[in-house]
Structure formats: structure tokens, C-alpha cells
Image: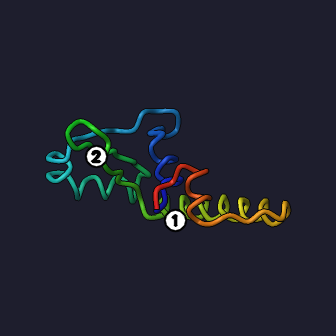
Amino acid sequence: MTNSAIMIIDIMVQGGQIMNTINLAEAKAKLSELVTDAEYKGGRTVIARRNKPAAVVIGYDDFKKFELLEDIYESRMLEESLKKGKFVTIEEAAKRLKIEL
């Protein structure tokens, strides 16, 4: 997953509500519950390591939607470049989008 998708996830908002955030130790103890919540209820949980967001548990369907959004975004960026006759290296594109390769 690229940083553009991570930025979307990092907004940490679900249906206008702040997502649940738990620490890594608690996530380990409740992993089955978190996965069930994500899979069947659409829950999203931020897992923090040393009080910083480190990962997100989301359902597979949501993950596939994020991937699709990322693909659409990247396709539109390519279309814009082709229309303008401008081509850049992957490194330059990543720099402009503030994405680490």
C-alpha cells in the first residue's frame, strides 16, 4: 500500500466518528475481536505503538476499496501527464506526491 492510501487511512475518521485507538499490547490480546469487528461490522481500529499510530485494522472489503481508490487516483495522474505531454520519472512523481519509495 502506498502512502497515498495510508494518508486516507490516517485521517482516522469513520462515519464522522473518531476511530477506536488501542495500544499494541491490547491489540494483541484482542486481535480476534478486532478482526471480527472489522470484517462484520465495518469497524476500523488504529493500533498505536509508543502512543503513535502504527497500523490500522480494517476489513478486507474496505481494504479493496482503498486499493481501488488508489488505482483511480494514479490513473487520473497518468491521464493528466499524457494530456500535457509531460512525463516524469517515478522518483519525481513520488517526490511531488510526497510518497516514499
At 56% from the left and 53% from the top, the residue drawn is 95
Amino acid type of disc 1?
Lys
- Quadrant in which residue 93 is drawn: bottom right
| Rendered residue at 56%/62% (across/down) | 91
Q: Nearer the viewer, residue 47 or 91?
A: 91
At a point 25% along the width and 54% down the height, the residue shown is: 33
Q: Secondary structure at mark 1?
A: helix
Place of residue 44 in the rendered image (x, y in percent of width and height, measured from the top left)? 39, 48
**What mark, if any, has residue 51 been given in the picture?**
none
Cα gap from disc 2 to disc 1, whole angstroms: 20 Å
Q: Which residue is mark 1?
A: 64
Residue 84 spot, x, y in % from top left: 84, 60
Q: Residues within 10 Å of mark 2 (few under 14, many from 20)?
A: many
Please give left or right for residue 7 compared with residue 72 in the image. left
**Residue tagged 2:** 47
Q: For the residue labelled by badge 2, is the local secondary structure a helix, a strand or a loop?
A: strand
Is 74 positioned to the left or the right of 49 in the image? right
